[in-house]
Image (spheres, rainbow, N blue to C red):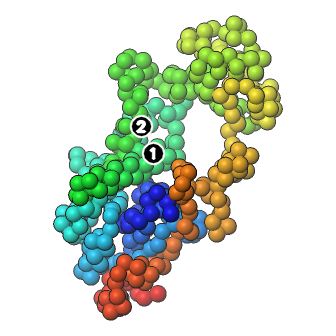
């Protein structure tokens, strides 16, 4: 009985941010059904369902949206839903005859969440792309990476998941709250370029104030400051330091055996090259585990850089039950945590279309209606 228990959400099968958003909504208790294709789309990277973690916790119905019966079925489902989330390029849902106009005419309380890289409007709205392209257009990619090399690729965490999925969930939940008062749904236009721009709001402020240096590794939080970066240790591992505040910087230096008085003032950029060289030399003198032991009782903003497997096994993560096992696959537990209505993982990802009959039963389609849908070809070949 999660915080979203009772909500019925339709997720149009997609890749990237939409499945991640669907996972979050499902973990928090919403009933999320995924509308998949009757034949594979060829998009994304193929995975065995139990390893497709972001698709966990919902059921799948396969619908051929090119058939009139398939479109009518989706509209019937929309009429019973609280929200719909989709990640097609602008105009696709409209061409299928299930766009916002049709959906809201049928169900005026529906929240129609639209996830794209570039938004529903603008000269590039219909361009194809992925996370990295949107990260570049929003200006964020130019800030990440070494000074003497190309921008680094931060997985697909920033645009797909941070600026995309999380903003989609916030927007849909906000619109659902408003609909409780107004009785009216609306369209949520969530674009990754908008979300990423929002994420870097602080640095736009720094640019306007003249405090941001455009060259990478020249600012405090982009790896330019010696006290906010990673260092290689004697055993070839890495540790992270993030001692921005003076009191934490002092603790870090003392734990490293360095007298802060022997260094230039912490925020004096002219002294950063020498400070970095000194830190590199000192951190290279011990293993990562030895540094962990040396600094464990200090407020030094220090930590080891762990692999994904090591993160699962770390005592702190284990104490918090930060990972769960589903069908033998370790994976992150639902986040955030609720004191009274805890979230839960409700099973692995389904095979496309595996739950068609069950969904039709639960959403009010009688046996004759189901038989008609199978006969029409709207549901593909009967499994």
On the picture, is 87 further left or further right than 237? left
Q: As displayed, is residue 258 above or below residue 19?
A: above
| Residue tagged 1 | 162
Q: Residue 59 in the image: x percent, y percent?
A: 47, 72
Q: As displayed, is residue 302 above or below residue 328?
A: above
Q: Residue 249 in the image: x percent, y percent?
A: 65, 19
Q: As displayed, is residue 277 above or below residue 184?
A: above
In the picture as drawn, the residue positioned furthest to the front comes out as: 340
Q: Name the residue located 33 percent from the left edge and 78 percent from the top edge.
A: 64
Contact check, label 2 and label 1, Cβ < 8 Å:
yes
Label 1 crowd bin: few (<14), some (14–19), many (20+), radius 10 Å: some
Q: Earlier in the sequence, mark 2 or mark 1?
A: 1
Element class at badge 1: helix
Q: Is residue 249 visible?
A: yes
On the picture, is 154 further left or further right than 128? right
The residue lying toward the viewer, choosing from 303 and 129, is 303
The residue lying toward the viewer, choosing from 110 and 65, is 110
| Residue tagged 2 | 199
Element class at badge 2: helix
Tell me the number on the disc at residue 180.
Answer: none
Q: Residue 199 in the image: x percent, y percent?
A: 41, 37
Label 2 crowd bin: few (<14), some (14–19), many (20+), radius 10 Å: some
Distance between mark 2 and mark 1 Cα atoms? 8 Å
Q: Name the residue located 27 percent from the left edge and 71 percent from the top edge.
A: 79
Q: Residue 106 in the image: x percent, y percent?
A: 21, 69
On the picture, is 72 further left or further right than 231? left
């Amino acid at each position: 009985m999660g915080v979203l228990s009772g909500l019925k959400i339709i997720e149009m099968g997609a890749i990237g941010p939409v499945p991640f958003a669907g996972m979050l909504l499902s973990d928090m208790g919403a009933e999320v059904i995924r509308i998949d294709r009757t034949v594979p789309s060829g998009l994304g990277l193929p995975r065995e369902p139990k390893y497709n973690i972001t698709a966990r916790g919902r059921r799948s119905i396969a619908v051929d949206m090119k058939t009139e019966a398939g479109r009518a079925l989706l509209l019937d489902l929309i009429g019973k839903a609280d929200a719909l989330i989709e990640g097609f390029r602008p105009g696709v849902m409209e061409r299928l005859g299930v766009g916002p106009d049709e959906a809201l005419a049928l169900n005026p309380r529906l929240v129609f969440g639209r996830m794209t890289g570039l938004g529903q409007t603008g000269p590039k709205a219909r361009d194809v792309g992925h996370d990295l392209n949107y990260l570049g257009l929003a200006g964020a990619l130019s800030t990440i990476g070494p000074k003497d090399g190309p921008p680094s690729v931060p997985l697909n965490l920033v645009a797909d998941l941070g600026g995309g999925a999380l903003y989609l969930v916030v927007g849909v939940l906000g619109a659902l709250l408003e609909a409780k008062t107004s009785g009216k749904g609306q369209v949520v236009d969530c674009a990754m370029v908008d979300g990423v721009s929002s994420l870097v709001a602080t640095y736009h402020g720094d640019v306007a104030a003249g405090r941001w240096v455009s060259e990478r590794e020249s600012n405090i939080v982009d790896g330019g400051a010696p006290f906010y970066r990673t260092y290689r240790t004697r055993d070839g591992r890495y540790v992270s330091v993030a001692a921005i505040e003076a009191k934490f910087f002092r603790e870090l230096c003392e734990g490293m055996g360095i007298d802060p008085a022997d260094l230039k003032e912490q925020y004096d950029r002219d002294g950063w090259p020498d400070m970095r060289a000194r830190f590199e030399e000192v951190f290279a003198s011990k293993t990562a585990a030895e540094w962990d032991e040396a600094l464990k009782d200090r407020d030094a903003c220090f930590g080891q850089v762990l692999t994904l497997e090591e993160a699962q096994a770390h005592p702190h993560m284990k104490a918090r039950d930060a990972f769960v096992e589903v069908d033998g696959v370790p994976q992150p537990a639902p986040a955030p945590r609720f004191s009274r209505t805890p979230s839960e993982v409700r099973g692995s990802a389904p095979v496309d279309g595996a739950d068609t009959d069950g969904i039709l039963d639960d959403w009010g389609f009688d046996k004759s209606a189901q038989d008609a849908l199978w006969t029409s070809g709207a549901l593909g070949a009967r499994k």
